Amino acid sequence: MQVYVEKPKCTGCSHCFDVCPVAVFQMKDRASPDVNSDVAPPDAQWKGEHIKEVTDKWSSVQDGHHHFAEKFEGGSGGISVAIQGPACILCQACLVECEGECIVITDDSNNVYKSIYK
Ligand code: SF4
Ligand code: SF4
């Protein structure tokens, strides 16, 4: 199994980190040197800019999460990195919880699963 986060869309909500039963995700500060250490292709890597459509949707939402915060603190903020993709058991919990709809999973038969926010 391969898992990555399309980081320009990641709000930093940390839902993936919270729900994954096998600890695939880790939240990183946006300036962390290993923020692009999952298997995300170049256009899904963090280069310092979010996608406007996502910031427009989530910047003003007050649900207790540090949306688009530089650092991970207080349970949210920063950016999610899929540090343990091969551990994924395809339970799909993260796929319905991802605010940014930015998690991509590819199974061993090359089927691709993308998050759709519930
Ligand atoms: S689908 Fe995989 S990455 Fe997502 S929560 Fe389940 S085990 Fe974790
Ligand atoms: S659930 Fe999605 S938007 Fe939220 S931190 Fe994880 S990857 Fe980012």
Image: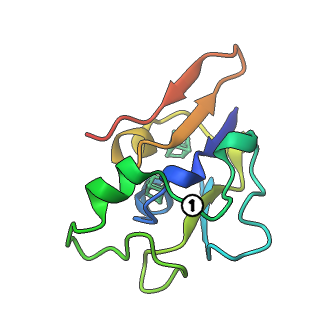
Whether residue 66 sits left or right of residue 46 in the image: it is left
Q: Which residue is mark 1?
A: 49
Image quadrant occupied by the N terminus: top right
Say whether residue 26 is visible. yes
Look at 42% across and 39% down and name the residue there. 95
Look at 46% across and 77% down and name the residue there. 69
Image quadrant occupied by the C terminus: top left
**Circle 1: is it few (<14), some (14-19), or many (20+) Cα within 10 Å?**
few
Find out if the beta carbon at label 1 lies less than 8 Å from the nearest ligand 2 atom.
no
Say whether residue 40 is visible. no
Question: In this view of the protein, which residue sits in the foreground, 11 or 3?
Answer: 11
Image position of 67 with respect to 87: above or below? below
To which quarter of the image does residue 59 belong?
A: bottom left
Whether residue 14 sits left or right of residue 29 in the image: it is left
Color scheme of the displayed model: rainbow
Q: Secondary structure at mark 1?
A: loop
To which quarter of the image does residue 109 belong?
A: top right
Question: In this view of the protein, which residue sits in the foreground, 87 or 51?
Answer: 51
Q: Which x, y percent locates residue 19? A: 43, 55
Image position of 58 with respect to 113: above or below? below
Q: Which x, y percent locates residue 83? A: 71, 56
Which kind of residue does numbered mark 1 sit on? Answer: Glu
Q: Which x, y percent locates residue 64? A: 25, 76
Look at 35% across and 40% down and name the residue there. 96
Image position of 95 with respect to 36: above or below? above
